[in-house]
Amino acid sequence: MMPLRRRITVANLAAGALVAGLLLVPTPASAAAGPTTLPAGQYTLSANYNQFDAVNSALVSTLGTAPVHTVMDNANHDRTALPSSFSVNGLVSGFRFDDGDNSDCRSYPQGITTSRDAVGTANSGNYDGHQLVLVSWYTNDACGGSGERSRITLVDWDATYPNKYRKILLVEPTGTAAVPNFKDIPVHAGGVSWYGDYLYVADTGRGMRVFDMRKILKTNTGGTADQIGRQSSGVYYAHNYAYVLPQVGTVTASTTSGTALRWSTISLDRVSRSIVMTEYTCQSGCTAYPNRAPRAIRYPFAAGVPTFAASTTASQALQLPWYKLNGVASHNGRWWFYSSGAHQLYYWTPTAGPTTYSFVSSGESISYWEDETNPDLLWTLQEGVGNRNVFAVEQAAYDG
C-alpha cells in the first residue's frame, strides 16, 4: 500500500494560483485510427549477460559493493513536494527533485521505473527494505552540448524513511581483470525498466544495456569533477559520485524489416513478463529523428527468470499512428503511449480501439504501478528545466 502521507490529494495540489496550461481537464476522444499489426517474427533480441564478468569481478573485489539499503541510508538529496499550481486529471501523488537538479540545464530526467516493477506488490513493493522510484538521466558536456554520461536516481518512497534520494553513475567496465577500470556511458537513457535484480536502460540505436542492482560499487568522492575511473595512484574516481553501477550485459536488437528500431523508451509489463519499447519519430520535417511511422514491440523474458534468452523473438509488433512518442506502458493487454509533441496520452486495446487524452507538456517515460489495495497507477515525469514534476495518476483515469 502506498503510505498515506504520500497520497497527496488533487484538491491539495490544486490549491493556490494555477499556472496557465497546467490544469488539465480530461478530454477523451476516439482517434481516427489505431495501431496496426506487424509481423512479430521480424524483430529479435540477442542477449549477453556475461560479457563483463571478469572485469566486474575484479572491480567488486577492489572497490566493494553497497546494497541498495546502504545507498539509501546515505541518500544526500532532499526531494520536494509538487508545486501547488500543478494539476492533472487523476493525480495521486508526486515530487520534485531539489532546486539544483530541477534547474540543471546539463542533465535531463528521462526514464522511470519503480521497486513495484522489480518485485511486484509483495512486501508493499519493497526492494531491499525500501519502496523506491528510480529515474534515469543523461548529462551533456555543457548546456545545450553533446551527451557526456548517464546516471540513475534512487528516490525514497516509503513513509518510514526520510524524503531523500541518491544519484548513482552508470559506467561501462573496461581494462582487464588484473587492472580493472570503467568509463562513462553517454547514452540518452530514454527509458528504464527494473525487473528482479536487473535494470534495463534503453540505448537508442542498439537496444538495452543491462545492470545488476546487487553490484553497486563504492568509489572515492575526492578528485575533480572531470575525473573518471582508475587513476595512476590506484584510486577510483567517478565525477565525485560515491556510487557507480557497472554494466553487466547488453541486449542487442535486430530486424529483418529493413529499418532499424530506435529505442526511445521502454517499460515493463509484469503481467505478460515482457518489456515493451517504442520509437520517437516525426511525421515529417525532422532532421535529428526518423520521419516515418513509429513502432511498438513487445519482447518476452525467458521462462521464470528476469532475463532474456540468448535469442528472443518478439511476441507482438505494432505500427502506430502517433508521433513524437516519449512514453509507453502496457499491462494486461492494454497500452498507453505518450506524445510530447502533441501533449497527449493515447490509450489503446485491440478490442476497444484508441482513446486520446490531453496530458502534460515535456513528458517522458511511463511506468505501471500495481497495487493490491489502492487503485493502480501510472508514474511519469517531465524533463523541462525548472518544471521537473515526477508524479502518479490513477490509470483508471486514462483507460478508455
Image (spheres, rainbow, N blue to C red):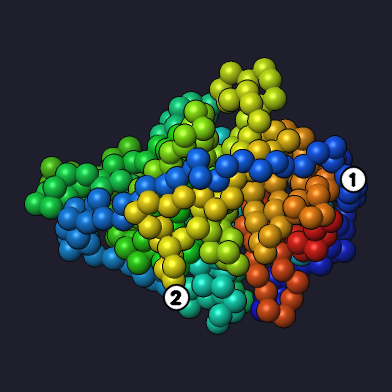
Q: Position of residue 270 (x, y in %)?
A: 57, 66
Dot 2 corresponds to which residue? 128
Nearest to the eye among marks 2 and 1: give it. 1
Q: x and y percent of residue 3 in the render? A: 67, 77
Judge left or right: residue 294 versus residue 208. Answer: right
Q: Which residue is mark 1?
A: 29
Residue at x 75%, y 54% (from the top left corner): 349
Which of the pair 111/156 is nearer the observer?
111
Residue drawn where x is 17% and y is 55% of the image: 54
Count neighbours of disc 2 (C-alpha within 10 A) and say few if under 14, some if 14 to 19, many if 20 or more.
few
Q: Amino acid at mark 2?
A: Asp
Q: Secondary structure at mark 2?
A: loop
Q: Is residue 83 above or below residue 138?
A: below
Please name the amino acid that badge 1 sits on.
Answer: Ala
Q: Is residue 54 above or below residue 69?
A: above
Residue 75 seen in render = no
